[in-house]
Amino acid sequence: MRVFLTGGSGYIGQATIAELVGQGHTVEALARSVRAEEAVVAVGATAVRGGLADLEVLREAAARAEAVIHLAQASSGEEDLAAAAAMQDGVGGGTYVHTGGTWVYGDTDGVQDETAAWNPPGAVAWRKAVEDAVLARTADGGRPVIVQPGLIYGGDNRLIDAFFVQPGTEKGAISYIGDGGNRWALVHIDDLAPLYVAALSAEAGSVYVGVGGVNPTAKEVAEACARAAGLDGKTTSITLEQASAEMGPIADAFALDQQFTPAKAQRELGWQPSHTEPLSVFAQD
């Protein structure tokens, strides 16, 4: 299958390109810089120069493809929606896989799935309008699919590393918010990439949470990261107010208490997360 992909030079993108190529697909990937072009080519894609604001580039690249996977992080909901519309116009009846995230559901009361009510923190509240518009294309013959990853770990651990490990290493202890008892719905990068590929065969209008099904507490993750960072497991509690001052609006998302099951993707796509001991992975990173 010919696949066009955005965000290919990023954390999720490089893993997904490698998975696509490994399964025999041909990939074109958006690249807004020479460095990004080199990154996508290195993992097996052909680069398409441009950014998310280059709507005609997106439309034309999508028109050459049989499916699209949109992984790039937009600067706003308006930019994300415009880019999604251009690519859906281009790919027509081909599958369009859009990236959301589990944070949109807010706190969960126990283990939930894709039917949970939305209660997003401010940082991701804009996603509702975008995802509704993406899914609405089903009525016009489109094949939209949404993948909502949990908090990703493994490899670079981007968000966790940037907001917790790096600052914690400088301070001598890894932080967690409040009592750290809130649970994080995690997914390993090496499991998430195959989910995106599997989603290419999903029914139009499908939504899948991308989680590993293991939901440790934020404090447990902090302790594992502190051991890996050579801090002898040292952690420290900070208030949500402190976290907001240090991290900005994303602190509200890190404070969420979330548990999700991957059962729908397992049942409908045959996807099977293989990383079921995240704390051991954090301890090694």
Image (cartoon, grey):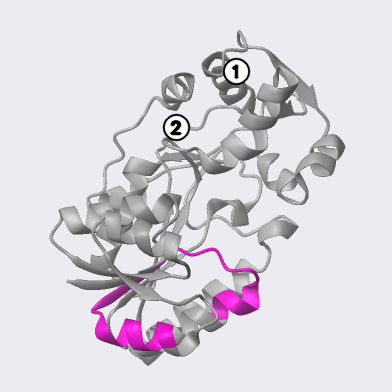
Q: Quadrant of the N terminus?
A: bottom left
Q: Helix or strand or loop: what does disc 2 sit on?
A: loop
Q: Position of residue 139 (x, y in %)?
A: 40, 88
Q: Which residues are magenta?
A: 57-81
**At label 2, which amino acid type do we have?**
Val
Pointer 1 local density, CA inside 10 Å: few below 14, some 14–19, many at least 20: many
Tell me if 4 is positioned left or right of 58 in this view.
left
Choose the circle earlier in sequence order: 2 or 1: 2
Relative to 115, say whether 87 is above or below: below
Outermost left residue? 24
Using the image as rendered, state which of residue 57 and residue 190 is in the foreground. Answer: 57
**At label 1, which amino acid type do we have?**
Ala
Instruction: Examine the rendering and report whether any part of residue 265 can be seen.
Output: no
Disc 1: which residue: 226
Q: Position of residue 209 (x, y in %)?
A: 44, 53
Q: Position of residue 34 (x, y in %)?
A: 43, 65
Q: How many marks?
A: 2
Disc 2: which residue: 214
Instruction: Examine the rendering and report whether any part of residue 188 can be seen.
Output: yes
Q: What residue is drawn where x is 52% and y is 17%?
A: 228
Relative to 274, say whether 284 is above or below: above
Asked if the stretch drawn in magenta spans residue 59, the answer is yes
Outermost top residue? 232
Q: What residue is drawn where x is 64% and y is 23%?
A: 219
Q: Helix or strand or loop: what does disc 1 sit on?
A: helix
Q: What residue is drawn where x is 70% and y is 58%?
A: 123
Asked if the stretch drawn in magenta spans residue 224, the answer is no
Look at the numbered discs 2 and 1 and tell me whether their residues touch, using CB distance below 8 Å: no
Spatial CA distance of label 2 from label 1 is: 20 Å
Residue 182 found in image quarter:
top right
Tell me if 112 is positioned left or right of 254 in this view.
left
Q: What residue is drawn where x is 36% and y is 29%?
A: 276
